[in-house]
Image: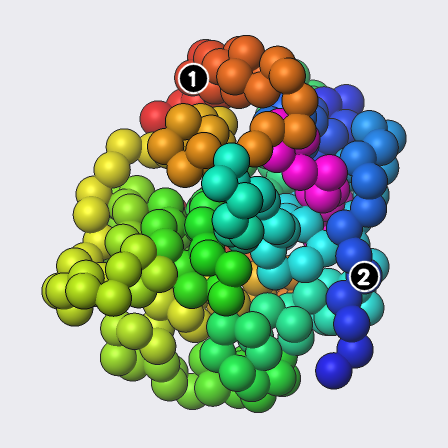
Amino acid sequence: MPGKNPAEAVREYIHPLQQSLSCFSRAVLRPSGYDTDRLLGVTFGSPTVELMTQRGEILRLSFVQEFSIIKALWLGAYKVRTHSYYYGLEDEHHAEIIAFHWHPDTTPQITFPHMHICAGAGDRIRPEIRGTHFPTSRISFEEFCLLLLREFHVVAERSDSERVLEENFLKFKNHRTW
Amino acid sequence: MQAVAPARDYVAEDTSAPFTAEESRQLFDATARQYVGMSGDDFLRAWDNGEFADSDARDRAMRVAILIPMIRKTSAREKSR
């Protein structure tokens, strides 16, 4: 959603992400600034935040999105454009298990969204699997969160987590440009 | 290594308070130490020199490199698709 000024545009952009994150964690997502036409980042104040599974296992979530704030000339309003995303799940010892990435500007040879199966997924993962960029569609943070909830059985912080994530995913689908 | 400020409780009006320059630097340094075992400054030098060529190291380096815009001003147009 556009904002009247850069700060409002960033708030509109972060709000659903923060709401989705609140399904698992009380960590706070913060941007690196409000400068227009500059590459900015949004993440939380530590490299990862801790999650708990229903089996009592500790996992760690990482989240970074790069974005810029652009002035939408036809509206006189400001919009956020996403440039990349990194969502990762790690074990207690910071070994990455699975990650969803899209970083076309940093790796011109890998411009498509992709998934990594990492060393933390198991000792017997073949090296070529660990090195593969498995192509995916564009993955929203909400889809990643639903995966954590449904497949990794991460304990939710709120009783309406699935509904919140489904609703925010729908908003994302309605506003995405690709 | 200086500790990174812990994540604060969720307060709606805080969600878009930007990181200060010092907070960004601390986060970058902590992430570099976590994933590639070097300080943030050393990582930046290595990244700029094109190190992390092999795929295993590169994936871990990418995890740090994505935070570079938080500590170094980068024009969005420079990195535009």
The residue pinned by badge 2 equals B5
Q: Chain of mark 1?
A: A
Pointer 1: residues within 10 angstroms few (<14), some, or many (20+)?
few
Q: CA distance from mark 2 to mark 1?
A: 34 Å
Residue depicted at 42% across the width and 64% down the height? A95
Q: Is residue B48 left or right of residue A8?
A: left
Farthest front residue? A55
Q: Would you identify the image quadrant in which residue B24 lies?
A: bottom right
Return the x and y of residue A73 as percentages of the image width and height.
61, 25
Q: What residue is rendered at 37% in x and 85% in y?
A: B51
**Residue under numbered circle 1:** A173
Residue A18, above or below B5: above
- The local secondary structure at tag 2 comes to loop
Does A32 appear in magenta? yes
Residue at 27 percent of width and 32 percent of height:
A137
Which image quarter: residue A71? top right
Q: Is residue A91 visible?
A: yes
Name which residue type carries label 1. Answer: Lys
Q: Is residue B62 above or below residue B37?
A: above
Specify the segment rendered in magenta. A22-35
Residue B18 spot, x, y in % from top left: 79, 48
User: Looking at the rendering, which quadrant does residue A27 occupy?
Assistant: top right
Are labels 2 and 1 assigned to the same chain? no
Relative image position of residue A15 (x, y in whole percent): 69, 27
Magenta residues: mostly which secondary structure?
Answer: loop
Q: Mark 2 near mark 1, Cβ–Cβ under 8 Å?
A: no
- On screen, residue B73 versus residue A123, left or right, reads right
**In what quadrant of the picture does the C terminus of chain A appear?**
top left
